Image (spheres, grey):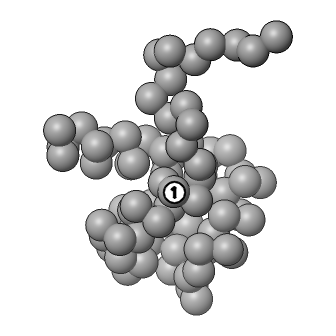
Amino acid sequence: MTVEQKNNPLHGITLEVILNHLVDRFGWEVLGQRIRINCFISNPSIQSSLKFLRKTPWARTKVEQLYLDTLKKQG
């Protein structure tokens, strides 16, 4: 049985898409200043960041919230 997620604004958007959007918009340096996690500050890459974010719920939540905030400001 499939659960509908009508009220989830992140439904269907992968973590990789979110991270690429934020890196394109802010760059690694600013992203590391906004969300103080080592994978954004020390030798950042998409793959290492994805690995960390998938294992760390609090960090993923911060990244997803920043993404939603940037969408609100665009719209």
The residue lying at 82 percent from left, 10 percent from top is: 1
Q: Position of residue 21 (x, y in %)?
A: 40, 61
Badge 1 amino acid:
Val
Q: How many marks?
A: 1
Q: Is residue 9 left or right of residue 48?
A: left
- Can residue 49 be seen here? The reply is yes
- 14 shown above or below 75: below
- Can residue 38 be seen here? The reply is no
Residue 27 image-quadrant placement: bottom left
Residue 43 image-quadrant placement: bottom right
Q: Is residue 17 left or right of residue 22?
A: right
Secondary structure under the numbered disc 1 in the rendered image: helix
The residue lying at 49 percent from left, 45 percent from top is: 64
Q: Nearer the viewer, residue 33 or 67?
A: 67
Q: Position of residue 50 (x, y in %)?
A: 66, 64
Q: Position of residue 58 (x, y in %)?
A: 62, 45
Q: Nearer the viewer, residue 61 or 71?
A: 71
- 57 shown above or below 21: above
Q: Is residue 74 left or right of residue 18?
A: left
- 65 shown above or below 44: above
For disc 1, the marked residue is 17
The residue lying at 39 percent from left, 48 percent from top is: 67
Crowd class of label 1 (few under 14; some 14 to 19; many from 20; radius 10 Å): few
Name the quarter where the C terminus is drawn. top left
The residue lying at 70 percent from left, 13 percent from top is: 3
Q: Position of residue 37 (x, y in %)?
A: 55, 67
